[in-house]
Image (cartoon, rainbow, N blue to C red):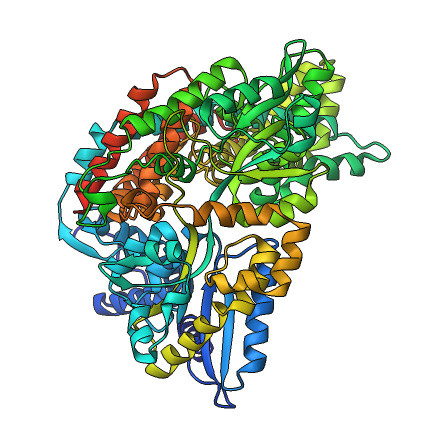
Amino acid sequence: MNDRVSSPMPSAWPVPTQPTVRRTAMKAWMEGMVYLLPSLLLFGVFLFYPLARTLYLSMFSTNYQGAPIRFVGWAHFAALFQDESFWHSVKTTFFFAALTVPTTVAIAFCLALLVHEKRKGIGIFRTLFASTMGMSVAVASIIWMFMYNPAIGIMNRLLSALGFPAVSWLLDPDTALYAVAIATIWMNIGFTFLLLLAGLQNIDPSLYESARIAGLSYWRQLWTVSVPLLSPTLFFVTTVSLIQALQTFGQIDFLTKGGPVDATNVFVYAIYREAFVNYQFGFASAQAIVLFVIIAAITFLQFRFAERKVHYQ
Amino acid sequence: MKNVLLGLLLAFVSIIAGCSSVDSKGETANRKTEVVFWHSMSGDLQPVLEEIVNDFNQTHSDIEVKPVFQGTYEEALTKWNAVAGTKEAPTIMQTFEVGTKHMIDSRQIVPVQTWIDKDQYDVSQWEKNIVRYYTVNGRIYSMPFNSSTPVLIYNKDAFRKAGLDPEKPPLTYSELKEAAKKLTKKSGKETKQYGFSMLNYGWFFEEMIAVQGGLYVNHDNGRSADATEAVFHGQEGRRVFELIRDMYRDGTFYNAGQNWDDMRAAFQAGKIAMYLDSSAGLKSLIDNSPFSVGVSYLPVPDGIERQGVVIGGASLWMMKGSSEKEQKAAWEFMKYVTSPSVQAKWHVRTGYFAINPAAYDEPLVKEEWKKYPQLKVAVDQLHETKPTAATQGALITVFPESRQHVVKAMEQLYEGVDPQEALDQAAKETNRVLQKTN
């Protein structure tokens, strides 16, 4: 007997034997799965199955009904990477995201700061700034379509009243993407604004008090208190906006149909046209898979690098 | 606890299962045969169509036709593709003219010729030019219903102000250019009124070629054998593109984009004095314009003989999946909508042609033509059409995609691309998809 080994403690609980442990763990796992089942089922039906099906279809040639006819392997992908219009739509999509995401977040942040303080009647402004959230893409697009109409639209009337030459907003390949971007920024401001305002409201007021006692200017307060504490929200809205921008569809369908000369033919619109106008479901599926991989990679990178700068309380 | 969960789960599964088992067809309790009718008539056209269906249901006690709006022709066709051959498919489906070959190749339809033969129905009473379009390999595949053609529409008041005779619209390219120059009004750098416009839409391009006698694809427009090659980039197509380029360069042509409503709004606002539009919307256009509206034939290049126009619009298709009884009921409905009195109403309320020319002798039409002589112009243009492969219209499955490439080519014109180069590119792309599907 070794004296370093203490004598067994008289235990009140019987030590469970190995099989019992496994059985309890199994039971707990099963119970957990039952709780998860509804959401797993929902995800399965509406996400996992379509994803698997898309991957499957991407390797087939299909008929007009979308039924697979002939196995082609990776041929669609190979054709895709050689397709000039594919790369053009990738470029257009990223340029569009670069135009809309930072601008939306910056404007929404400024608006949130403006109405953050409690003043009389501030609720009216908060409602106004958030109001675009309640508008569907379809309605907003129609409004912008009329505003951009070169013949009767308000935009050109304003320009001509100010003495500028008329611009054919959506009809000129050089301006169309910017015009759609402006409309998109306007549409997305409401949602982004609301989240950022909620984030600002959650910051402990005592921190601002301490900052004031320490004699920090408004801008220093903004930079040392508001921004770091708001960073989780900022990170969230940027990530979500970016994903949304890469998946833009509605505005394009209503305003430009991908034209003129493919200037606004963003990724998702190109996929839609391939599948539902040209009935090339296999090729469209391959494009959708590529889009999925791109978005997944970007979101991963965002979490990997940008999230380090996020300050969680 | 587990029982509750299980119960919830079962409820959930049955909800999902319930979604897919909604039975939209079959017979109703009072033994009426139900005919589901998918259509794409929106705006001012929808209430007129629903009125016609209503009248039919009231006069036919054993049949109930249910009209279901399914979005634009393109959208409806996509939806139909998903359900064709299943129980969810409608009994009657309205499809645009360029979907004709797609429908035939789907093998999910019954040619109406089957019922024409069974019923010994006399089709010689129909408008010849319309029947010609829907006849493929000697058989009529679908029931022509709403047919239209493009026309030149112009602002008579603007003609008067510019010193032009409002009763003498331009008929040739050089007359068109001349008139457009006089109609274009500038104040400083800004153009207040443009002379002419044409939507960036494949249909107008196809019609402008056909009116010169030009073909869109080979093998007699795909009528004598499956088309293998696009031929629209020949001299006829080039003339159309050069016309647009020249007028755009002169500053007399207005780029209206791809949106029909934008273009009509521009015309009604006085921004354009002449443009091409479908005869289908004539009635409401005349009613809603704050000036008097003139209607004329499509212009042709100088020295080229006018061949006429290709029929546009849509037709009604009968589905193979439906029962004999449903097909019979659908056939009754088809006969009803093409009868002279219904067609007379349809023509004067919308501007679509009457499938049955006897409709033009109905008092209703005669009266309306006195008030709206413009409606008659489109009918005359159709009647003067010469029966050739060009005016019969092209028959290809990949029309929607080919049109995209033509639209892109038209848009490139405004960017200064050479007409022939833009056309060649569109033809090359069309060939690629033609060969892919053959």
In-image side of A194 versus A280 (left or right):
right
Rendered position, A85 above or below B153: above
Image x and y of residue B310, in percent:
38, 46
Rendered position, B168 above or below A67: above
Image x and y of residue B35, in percent:
45, 76
Question: Which image quarter holds the N terminus of chain A?
Answer: bottom left
The part of the image, by quadrant, that contains residue B325 is bottom left
Image x and y of residue B53, in percent:
55, 71
Q: Residue at x 36, y 24 (%)?
A: B239
Can residue A266 be seen here? yes
Question: Which image quarter holds the C terminus of chain A?
Answer: top right
Q: Residue at x 60, y 37 (%)?
A: B264
In-image side of A62 versus B279 (left or right):
left
Image x and y of residue A215, in percent:
74, 13
Of the pair B105 and A78, the residue shown nearer to us: B105
In-image side of A126 versus B80 (left or right):
right
